[in-house]
Amino acid sequence: MTEDWQNGGFGLYIHWPFCEAKCPYCDFNSHVSRAIDHRAWRNAYLTELERAAAETRGRVLNAVFFGGGTPSLMDPDTVADIITAIKGHWPTANDLEITLEANPGSVEAGRFTAFGQAGVNRVSMGIQALNDRDLRRLGRLHTVEEALTAFDIARNQFDRVSFDLIYARQDQTLEDWRKELKQALSLAVDHLSLYQLTIESGTAFGDRYARGKLRGLPDEDLGADLYALTQDLCGENGMPAYEVSNHARDGAQSRHNLIYWRYGDYVGIGPGAHGRLTLAGSKWATECHLQPGRWLSGVGKGTSEKPRALLTNTDQATEYLLMGLRLKEGIDLKRYAAIAGAPVDPGALDHLIDIGMVEHSDERINVTDQGFIVLNSVLEALLPD
């Protein structure tokens, strides 16, 4: 019998929690540490892989993602040992995608050859801006020149290279973004992640904003115009959005992230890593302890994870809706009904179709371009009670 997770696939996320510096907009689980015992971390990851494999034996692994933090600061030998262990624990897809996030500094770029030899076949680079003033404002340590040099090295080493940019930045005009995005599209290999700057509580930007000292942010109308420009330019250049913030050439979508958005199963290893695992017919949410020291010491005791949460049918239906409607392809209504035990609210769906927020065809629904601008409201209308 096919379990629901198989509609989305099976992936593995490995979190490296360390960075050279903490960016002021970042709310990820990242830490600055003067001393890192790379051997201890290697051994911990290998131990956790063995534990995870025992629960998911025989599953075909579709994708591996080294995230962070800054995993390009990992010892390449550690990455190689992890990849070797992964291939020993699970059967893998013929087109197994192994992505590593990288900062475009000279230290990381110098390791790209070693990462490629270790088995990494896709790199995702956090460039974030293509002018030095905004890089400084964003707390980035690299310059544009360093970023472009690192990018050249990456695309000569890897067939698949993505990079991130943040827009809707302080004092950024529509014309500023048009020029920057055109430059990005001229450089892009096969994938771009383009995120609107969001101010998160608990970050340096969040604190600054609360004190009224983060000036020059776009208003709602300019934010919408920036988003629309992004969709238009990327579409015209053969890199349409396949998800709210992600653009790719045909066939170059991030397979790992598609597992999340298509609501597959994935193992999360490392401080703060989340997972979703279907075991004996029940789906569980997993979460590792946040603090690196707490996680590392917990591995040896078998206590690296927090207590798992059993997801009800309603929980799963909610997550499938929240994740799947971020994709241009949308969700399968029959699959939703099978998970939820009931169909999507027909009244809410009909209303959203009537006002042009959602499209319905061949037992699928997807959010329209107009609907993506107000995606949170669309999701709220469709979520189960």
Image (cartoon, rainbow, N blue to C red):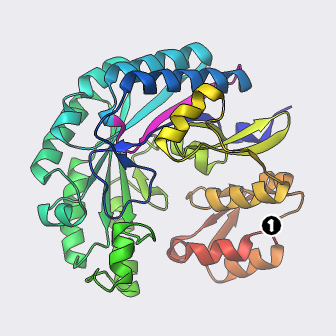
**Can you say which quadrant of the picture contains the C terminus?**
bottom right
Q: Residue at x 40, y 18 (%)?
A: 80
Dot 1: element: loop
| x and y percentages locating residue 88 in the rendered image | 57, 13
**In screen coordinates, is 190 left or right of 2?**
left
**In screen coordinates, is 324 left or right of 113?**
right
Q: Residue at x 79, y 51 (%)?
A: 311
Label 1 sits on residue: 344
Which amino acid type is marked by label 1? Val
Whether residue 281 appears in this view of the structure is yes
Q: Which residues are magenta?
A: 56-71
Task: Sort mark 1 into few (<14), some (14-19) or many (20+) by Cα contacts within 10 Å.
Answer: some
| x and y percentages locating residue 190 in the rendered image | 34, 43
- Based on the picture, tell me whether residue 70 belongs to the magenta stretch: yes
| x and y percentages locating residue 117 in the rendered image | 32, 17
- Based on the picture, tell me whether residue 47 belongs to the magenta stretch: no
Quarter where residue 23 is shown: bottom left
Q: Residue at x 65, y 36 (%)?
A: 9
Of all residues, the one furthest to the right in this rendering is 341
**Can you say which quadrant of the picture contains the N terminus?**
top right
Residue 221 higher or lower than 102, as above or below: below
